[in-house]
Image (cartoon, helix red, strand yellow):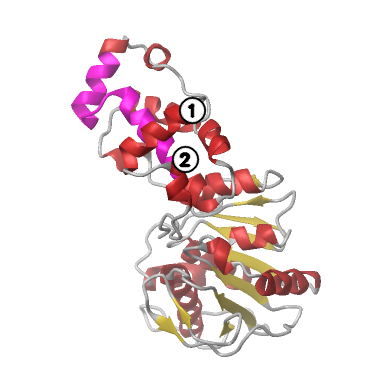
Amino acid sequence: MSRQGEIIETKDAKPRRFVFVLMNEFTMMCFASAVEALRIANRMADKNLYEWRVVSVDGQPVISSAGVVFKVDAGLEDLCRDDSVMLCGGLNIRAASSPKLVNWIRKESRRGSSVTGLCTAAYTMAKAGLLDGKRATIHWEHHDGLVEDFPDIAVLNSVFVVDGKMITTAGGTSSIDLMLKFIADGHGEHLANAVADQLIYTSIRTEKDSPRLSIPSRIGVRHLKLSNVIQTMELNLEDPISPAVLAKDVGMSTRQLERLFQRYLNRSPKRFYMEIRLQKARNLLMQTDMSVINVALASGFSSPSHFSKCYRAQYATTPYRERGVKAEVPAT
């Protein structure tokens, strides 16, 4: 029921069924956000508009990224054509994308099921070939890795992306936005807004919205020229731009730019640029099979020895040793 206690009118239709596939070390946020939105929609409509099952690759309980163990209803099974597959990804997505799972989603896709990748599960869909030539999104920390591993995919910085029956989200609360779209498409904006109200979700995002905070919010500083310079840096990690050119582009001298970075970020433009390039390099090392030399080039380092030296200074280890670490960069 809504806040006023009335039952919300909905279209009479067969309940839509979702099959949530919990992958090893999945993030609870993406799963819980999706299920709660469906549960509340049923409550608001006072009928079962949505049904869901929770499965795992082998039918055994699954450990989430937070260490919480989840029981499941079954293992992978043949689905009805109208079922919607919801892959719940998280940490170590490459290891979680087992051949058995990849083959299963490929088969279910051919049978007509829609497939959605929550959080990092776009990687699993890509590995299955479901995103070839399509648009997609993924958690922002895995964006560069997906671009490098699957160049035929148009990877967008969007909260979610719907491309036919292939759907991807950027992780975290983006599951709520996607479910609210499903609810609105199936049963109207009034019900979707009522669900958002119950979730205390005051700003419903669309496919056009970015999953990341704006640069001023991220750095805690609202300075237009500083934000513009940082945005230019983030868009040019493979081919770094000199501080002199960055300063000129925003109508400042190099000395003024230096003072601006020192005042607000307590580091030089060169140091800041280096840090975000090294962060990209670390993501690629952890999330792809790219050689260390290619990672260096993709992060704007022309010399592998210089890259190794800078990497060691930043992370107290070498790129080669980092590649041997099993844990991936965390996803929310």
Quadrant in the rendering for residue 130:
bottom right
Question: Which residue is at 41% across, 69% downward?
Answer: 29
Magenta segment: 256-282
Whether residue 308 appears in this view of the structure is yes
Seen from this angle, which residue lies furthest right? 110
Q: Is residue 178 above or below residue 57?
A: above
Quadrant in the rendering for residue 59:
bottom right
Query: What residue does disc 1 label?
Result: 301
- Whether residues under marks 1 and 2 lie with C-beta atoms below 8 angstroms apart, the answer is yes
Magenta segment includes 278: yes
Q: Is residue 317 left or right of residue 11?
A: left
Residue at disc 1, secondary structure: loop
Query: What residue does disc 2 label?
Result: 281
Q: Is residue 58 above or below residue 182?
A: below
Quadrant in the rendering for residue 252:
top left
Q: Nearer the N terminus, badge 1 or badge 2? A: 2
Question: Which residue is at 63% across, 81% downward?
Answer: 17
Q: Nearer the viewer, residue 208 or 238?
A: 238
- Tell me which amino acid carries mark 2: Ala
Q: Is residue 62 above or below residue 307?
A: below
Q: Position of residue 127 (x, y in %)?
A: 68, 59
For disc 1, the neighbor class at 10 Å (few under 14, some 14 to 19, many from 20) is many
Question: Which residue is at 63% across, 79% downward?
Answer: 11
Q: Is residue 158 left or right of residue 322?
A: right
| Cα distance between the residues tagged 1 and 2 | 10 Å
Question: Which residue is at 53% across, 60% downward?
Answer: 120
- Tell me which amino acid carries mark 1: Phe
- Looking at the rendering, in which quadrant would you find the C terminus? bottom left
